[in-house]
Amino acid sequence: MIERHAPQVSESEVLRLDNQIGFLLRRAYQRHASLFNRFMPDGLTPTQSSALIRLLEHGPISQNRLGRQIALDAATIKGVVDRLNARGLVAVESDEEDHRRVAITLTEEGRRFTTGYLRKVEELAEATLKPLDVDERDAFLSALHRIC
């Protein structure tokens, strides 16, 4: 039998789950992730997309630095790069100056693939931010940049 308890705080208090930043960020991300799965091509993950776009923006980069630039630890970025490499979207080479370092580059196929879905990235952003007007979007993105 489930035991029911009276709430410990009033509905108007800040401690309500619906007012918790972590809860709201998770809900917003769940919404975005659902939209991502509808908009993006062949099973690409948000993390893989971030890696491909960063490589398109900056060109060849060490695996470690790529991970740092998209907020992933060394083990996670290795898995992302391995999966992108298996799909033929990136090339992995030892750095000529430091053989312990691995350099990641978009392949020609990876460049075509990434540039081909950038329009979908725009559509995804539009769908994610649809509930907000233009001023709210600017304020929201600005606040996120300050937090991150």
Image (tube, rainbow, N blue to C red):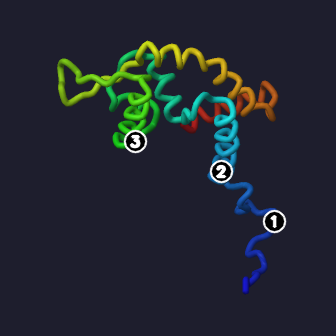
Q: Secondary structure at mark 2?
A: helix
The reply to whether callout 3 and callout 2 are in contact (CB within 8 Å) is: no
Identify which residue, 87 or 26, lies in the foreground: 87
Compared with residue 27, is residue 74 higher up or lower down, i.e. above or below? above
Q: Which residue is mark 3?
A: 76
* Residue type highlighted by circle 1: Glu
Q: Which residue is mark 1?
A: 11
> Residue at (54%, 36%) from the top-left corner?
45
- Residue 14 location, x and y as percent? 73, 59
The mark that comes first in sequence, 1 or 2, is 1
Label 2 Cα neighbours within 10 Å, binned few <14 / some 14-19 / many ≥20? few
Q: Secondary structure at mark 3?
A: helix
The reply to whether callout 1 and callout 2 are in contact (CB within 8 Å) is: no
| Disc 3/disc 1 C-alpha distance (Å) | 40 Å
Compared with residue 3, is residue 63 higher up or lower down, i.e. above or below? above
The reply to whether callout 3 and callout 1 are in contact (CB within 8 Å) is: no
The mark that comes first in sequence, 3 or 1, is 1
Q: Which residue is mark 2?
A: 21
| Disc 1/disc 2 C-alpha distance (Å) | 17 Å
Q: Quadrant of residue 60?
A: top left
Compared with residue 3, is residue 101 higher up or lower down, i.e. above or below? above
The mark that comes first in sequence, 3 or 2, is 2
Q: Is residue 137 left or right of residue 58?
A: right
Q: Quadrant of the N terminus?
A: bottom right
